[in-house]
Amino acid sequence: MRGLLPFYRALNALCNRQVRRRTGFAGSECGFSGTVSVSKPQPCFGLLFDIDGVLVRGKIPIPAAKKAFQKLVNSQGQFVVPVVFVTNAGNCMRQIKADQLSHILGVPITMDQVMMSHSPLRMFKKYHDKCVLVSGQGPVLDIAKNLGFQNVVSIDMLRESFPLLDMVDHNRRPKLPSSPIANLPTVEAVILFGEPIRWETNLQLIIDILLTNGNLSGAHQTQKLPHLPLLACNMDLMWMAEAQSPRFGHGTFLVCLENIYKKITGKEVKYKALMGKPSELTYHFAEYLIRGQAVERNWTQPITSLYAIGDNLMTDIYGANLYSCYLEERNRRKNSKAVAKMATGTGSSAALPQDNDHVENAWESELSPPSATSCKSILVCTGVYNPHTEVPTYANKCIKETVFHGHRDFRFDPALVEPGHIVQDVADAVELIFEQEKFVPQ
């Protein structure tokens, strides 16, 4: 992730201009464009829905959700626009989440419409044949193997093999003297799917793995650098369930891990990748799924606009605006290259400077280039967002820790947490999008 930081910082100046001047959505008439008949409008936009706080609160459906999806599905049970559910949850596989959403919303949803926080791990093939330690809850071993990882070790497996390492809970300490059961391979990378159940056990053993270079039979080496590759999914500090106030999320667990590691070693934890909203990687993968749905439905009109509906300024809105900046910057560079090629009269880019973002974002080679040119953010008031609080206009006038709930590796920028629109609920969001796009499903 540190390798991606220069890319994100380079976008901040661009975003300050582009996001602040965004006062609304420019309408389009893609619903009736091209050769598509009026009776069968073809969308040129896709929808990215957050789940918790937008469609449900815990296990309780938000009333507006069913109303919204009645507009999105036709009489044959088909979606009239491409839709992807982008959640930072990571405790189950996509099919399970699709089945849950189908039951809650009363419409058929396939796993190809669901993106978990860990979904982009499919692209990190360089780690698929390594021995990886996974942390989280739910069927973590099955999830990892489904993503392509072939040699997986869980925290419980480590604890069973090294019973003397987990000592916080006195009742779980070994009753009799025991020796390590050295039947596990050396861990080569660590993957954090989501918040675990026993934080003290997971924190202790993850720190042990990082400080022993994957060999728990050895002692801590606090000066050895760099530590093993660390990949984390879901950076949400908090999320909205049935309670009146938000609950701790995986981002809170990461704060604990980062601070414990720094306290012990004096150095920062470094991530190879951070996935889940607001990571630009996550939105790129979601856009890839959107395009896949359009191809499957034989919609030939390119998907040029994305709309991200969420309840959290620091993840949903920040992420959508960041990705929109990425798309705008990408198009700017693409256009400047085309002009440069024409100027040389050769049509060749061999003499042009290398594109830095392709160097920074090596994972882009796993996906085809995006067709979208913008990602527009819509904030709903049914989850984490409290409409009675304000985001400071200037970052230097706020106490960062009490305002910015984003991850350590993402810098606070007021422009990036400014939604394109604020609406009451998801039904209002869908109605607004259809109005902006002049889209009338038949």
Image: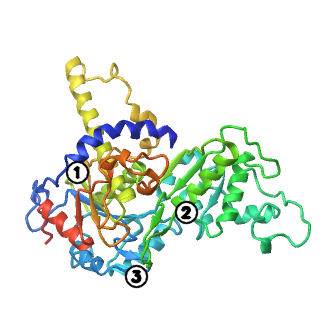
Give the image location of residue 356, x and y in percent: 40, 31
* Callout 1: SS: loop
Q: Earlier in the sequence, mark 3 or mark 2?
A: 3
Looking at the picture, does residue 284 appear above or below residue 381? above
For badge 2, the amino acid type reads Gly
Q: Which residue is mark 1?
A: 304
Q: Which residue is mark 2?
A: 194
Disc 3 to disc 2, C-alpha distance: 21 Å
Q: Residues within 10 Å of mark 1 (few under 14, many from 20)?
A: some
Give the image location of residue 45, x and y in percent: 22, 57
For badge 1, the amino acid type reads Thr
Q: Is residue 399 left or right of residue 321?
A: right
Is residue 400 at all visible to an observer of this figure?
yes
Is residue 192 at all visible to an observer of this figure?
no
Residue at point 51%, 59% (across, down) = 251
Q: Which residue is mark 3?
A: 60
In the image, 300 versus 372, the foreground residue is 372
Looking at the picture, does residue 89 appear above or below residue 305? below
Give the image location of residue 103, x and y in percent: 39, 81
- Residue contact at pointers 1 and 3, CB within 8 angstroms: no
Q: Residues within 10 Å of mark 2 (few under 14, many from 20)?
A: many
Residue at point 23%, 33% (across, down) = 335
For badge 3, the amino acid type reads Ile
Q: Earlier in the sequence, mark 1 or mark 3?
A: 3
Q: Residues within 10 Å of mark 3 (few under 14, many from 20)?
A: few
Disc 1 to disc 2, C-alpha distance: 32 Å
Disc 1 to disc 3, C-alpha distance: 34 Å
Q: Quadrant of residue 37?
A: bottom left
Residue at point 81%, 64% (across, down) = 163
In the image, 408 versus 439, the foreground residue is 408
Residue at point 24%, 23% (across, down) = 340
